[in-house]
Image (cartoon, rainbow, N blue to C red):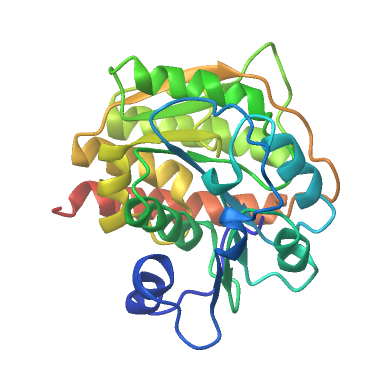
Amino acid sequence: MRRGGRRCAKEEVDSAGLLRAPEGWAINEANRHNPKRRERRQPMTEPRTLFIIPAYNESANIERVLQELSEVARPEEILVVSDGSTDNTAALTRRQPVALLEFPFNLGVASVMQAGFRYALRHGFTAAVQFDGDGQHVPGEAAKLLAALAAGDCDIAIGYRSGGERVSTLARHLGSKILAALLVLLTRRFYRDPTSGFRAFSRRAIEAFAKNFPEEYPEVESIVLAKKLGLRIRETPVTMRPRIAGKSSITVLGSAYYMVKVMLASLVIMLRRY
């Protein structure tokens, strides 16, 4: 999924994520109670958990991702957010009995996640899992993140690659190391994989991030923001895998640009009052 992207007015995102869909936007919830889908998988956990799937041009991956995820979550517990996709991502998602939110153009993962948090509040979910649409995240591993929330000692559980697994690109590996050092300076804590997008959020975190969330590159900035908001973070080892298909949009130059923006934005978050 593209990490950045065009932004729209906050009111538009609010409407799409929580109140109503403006012209050009689409929310598909008709399949959430599809009568053809009588068999229900045993839910991964109680209370209710929403899996938020950011998807930008993931037509090569989304069907398999949804099929795998259906083994651990009910259809009504899955929300796909097609972030201005220009391929068949949305069309393929409509074939499945899951909720679909479509953006008319690419806004970036931050807008996707905040819309997902607001959807979770609107529909009474008490936990949420950020789950990539490219196949890197293993559905069964989400149970480890949710168990960390259930233990009651954290509001956000971040999955980090265990067992010496390699990250997707060298650029991301180097960038992750640099950003981890930045977080040590800002939060006085070391994070093994601060760019990981495999995360679980408690109701408290959902409520906080539905109101305030980083503008463009949320993984690192949200850690800084969580500290400012008094949210507790715990890292949990998980297994991840390479993308099922396609390739990451993160390049060396893109990583350098990303790190500069994240550093500046993180400093602003530390100075801002919430």
Name the residue rendered at 45%, 33% in the picture: 200
Q: Is residue 212 visible?
A: no
Quarter holding residue 20: bottom left
Outermost residue toward the top? 163
Give percent across and percent down for residue 80.
Answer: 60, 55
The quarter of the picture where the N terminus appears is bottom right
Name the residue rendered at 39%, 46% in the picture: 221
Query: On the rendered structure, is 21 left or right of 27?
Result: left
Image vertical order of residue 190 relative to residue 271, above or below = above
Give percent across and percent down for residue 5.
Answer: 56, 69
Outermost residue toward the bottom? 23
| Front residue (pair 101, 76) | 76
Give percent across and percent down for residue 103.
Answer: 57, 73
Name the residue rendered at 56%, 62% in the picture: 4
Image vertical order of residue 25 relative to residue 244, above or below = below
Q: Is residue 65 visible?
A: yes
| Front residue (pair 190, 201) | 201
